[in-house]
Image: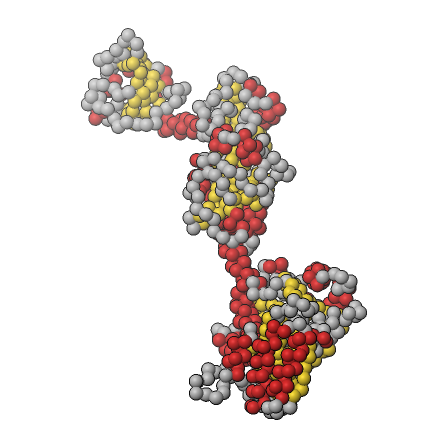
Amino acid sequence: MTAPAPHSGGFPPGAIVAAVLISAEGTVVWWSHAAADLVGQTAEEVCGRPARELLADARDCAHPRIPARGRFRLRHRSGACIEVDFRTLSLEASLEVLVLASPASEAAGWGHDVALLRALFAQEKTKIVLCDTDLRILRGDLTKRSGTPDGVAPAGGRLRDVMPPAEAGAVEAVLRQALDGGAAVIGGTQRIGAVGERRDFPVCALRLEDAAGRSAGAVALFADISHEQSTRHDPDVFRQASLRISGSLDVARCAEELAEVLVSGFTDLVAVTLADSVLVGDEPLRALGGGELRMRRVAVAAASGAYPAALLQPGEPVPSMPDMRTLRLSQQGRTVVLTRAEAIAELHHPDLVSRYVPEDGHSVITAPLFARGLMLGLVIAWRTDRPDPFDEDDRNLLAEVTSLAAVAVDNARRYTREHRMVAALQQRPLPGSATDTPAAETAGVYRPAGGGANVRGDWFDVIPLPSFRSAFVVGDVAGYGLVATVAMARVRTAVQTLADLELPPEELLARVDDLVLRLASEAPPGSSHMVGATCLYAVYDPVACRCTLASAGHPPLIVIRPDGTAEVVEISPGPPLGVGGMPFEVSTLDLDPGSILALCTKGLVLTDEGLDSGMRRLASALAEECRGERSLEEAGHAVAERIGCPPREDLVLLLVRTRAVAPDRTVDWTLPADPAVVARAREMITRQLTLWGLDELAFTTELVVSELVTNAIRYAGGPIRMRLIRESTLVCEVTDPSNTQPRLRHARSTDEGGRGLFLVAQLASRWGCRYGERGKTIWAEQPLVASPHRD
């Protein structure tokens, strides 16, 4: 016979149809009844004949040896050909061969059935048990565990031998129902396995029948759905993470949202740790290994109950860590899964174990918040109630979620840094919260919009002016963020520069209006309407106890008199800065010493009822909070807390308590435009300085007065006013009716004049000129040198 092509199918034991015994010479020795039925020939007809005569194809007879298995075609008595699958068995102590054969069509189906059974018994996630009609186990597998050899339920035993009694009883009830009814029965879900490793299995039971249709037992199928249950929320976890985490620009809130998302469908306990530098907007330092990590626990969450109190809590810094493999992998951007024992071995120290390992945690996964090659933070997730340990799918999911979260945290970090820079630019130029000058005591309160989340362009300023005067400024530039801050800085610088020129309030605002118009012309197309500002500028003279002010579309100021009454000062506000082409009106206000001026921006007086209602509310609050000996700073903060700040507006409040220069510290004279009065002016100055105990300043002051009075007589005419003011410094003023700008120049050696202002500049610590409604005033300032024998 020739050896036919190998056939991988064959047939299972018990499915054999025919049996033939063939001698060593190839003769049929024994012929079964099944063989007779298969080919239609009896044993008497076949025995003694060569076996090759039964074959339909002569090519199969070329080789005398019968292969171990294969497929042949046999000739039926009727002349038809029958294709059979066969196997050969060699008999012990004999050269005879037993051939077992069955029709190929039936053998193929039996082969598929066997393959199916093998596949079912080999599946990790599927368990099967065959029982007889008494529900004794014929074959089964209920103890299989991941990573361990297959465990087979004992043949002849009961389900209670491999399952808890309650669960075994429930499964047997399902099997009995299938045996009695004959139809497949779905018996709900059962938890099978050891404590801590138990999994959920839905149960399906089927009745087994023999060829006659009689009940031969039952089979129970268990499909492990624990993994599907643990991962069926995976798409939702990622979707929720993308929606919730990416929508926040607050670093800590991003961490909190991440923790809440993860415990909603992924893990039982989660903690998010961030680098200290990330929390303030800076980039984290590159690190590899343990030590002081400079990180802090920011957010925790638990799927059920409270987060364990023994573990590291939000706000607590991360302790010094050993040089762990897991930590190094995290610092390289890798997600790591560990068992409880592995985590304890990594941490090693009992104190660290108690702060990081929950009592009932059996599996942990750590994932870094990794962006641009830097570890911004770390996510640590534990499974306690969920029986399945973290696997590769969980690792991949958490890596995707933390990658998304890392981008959100990095964006929030950048926003925090930029906001901090804007806030610094906004607040750094502002004067100290409290100032103290001969003119007034001041205190300012500034609070950015939204508690600091949206910095706008509000500012206040206190500018010391010559002759002990002070300028008080409050302004509001349109817009918010860096653009408004830069515009505010430019406007504020312009106000300070023009204030040093001692321009009157209405003229100063007109000059600043020109600047804002220029800023609008420099703005990108379509955004020039966003460039604008309001401003209130006031100058207080402590000698005259008079305040001169002008407004550019700004809320008015409030005066709290020494008797405690509060009044909203009615002024004529000009247009906001940036409108152009319209004048600003000046107002004058006489004040008693100890009066309090309150200047604010609209954030403090913005109400639904309108500006007037807001101003009355502020006046009432100021009248109550500024009573008694309470400091201006305390009163300002109390008013700000009482009224509050709108979410989209900055709040600025500047409080000014006015002072007065005592009358005995000032003296002035009116002189005619006669050269002869120069000597007289020197005498009057010397006499007054002697009375004040400032004889040491007499010589220099005489020279200053002599030069200034001489210039006034020569170039301006009369009358001439001369004034001395003694406070923290000595100020000498000479006022004339001319508006001609004095010039400081260096006279040549042959010039007979031109050295007056040069001498004044050399003798005084500073000097300057300001213009009034009629003429100008040149002033010179000298530090005081008190006489040891006079007050």
The residue depicted at 54 percent of the width and 21 percent of the height is 162
Residue 170, given in percent of the width and then of the height, sits at 61, 26
Name which quarter of the figure residue 665 lies in. Answer: bottom right
The residue depicted at 59 percent of the width and 40 percent of the height is 313
Query: Would you say residue 493 is visible in this rendering?
Result: yes
Compared to 287, does 687 lie above or below?
below
> Which residue in the rendered view is the most extreme toward the left?
62
Q: Along the line of sight, which residue is nearer the eye, 285 or 331?
A: 285
The residue depicted at 49 percent of the width and 86 percent of the height is 754
Q: Along the line of sight, which residue is nearer the eye, 534 or 720?
A: 720
**Which quarter of the rendering shows the N terminus?**
top left
Q: Along the line of sight, which residue is nearer the eye, 773 or 175?
A: 773
Compared to 182, does 261 lie above or below?
below
Residue 7, given in percent of the width and then of the height, sits at 30, 27
Residue 310, given in percent of the width and then of the height, sits at 61, 35
**Which quarter of the rendering shows the C terminus?**
bottom right
Residue 298, given in percent of the width and then of the height, sits at 57, 45
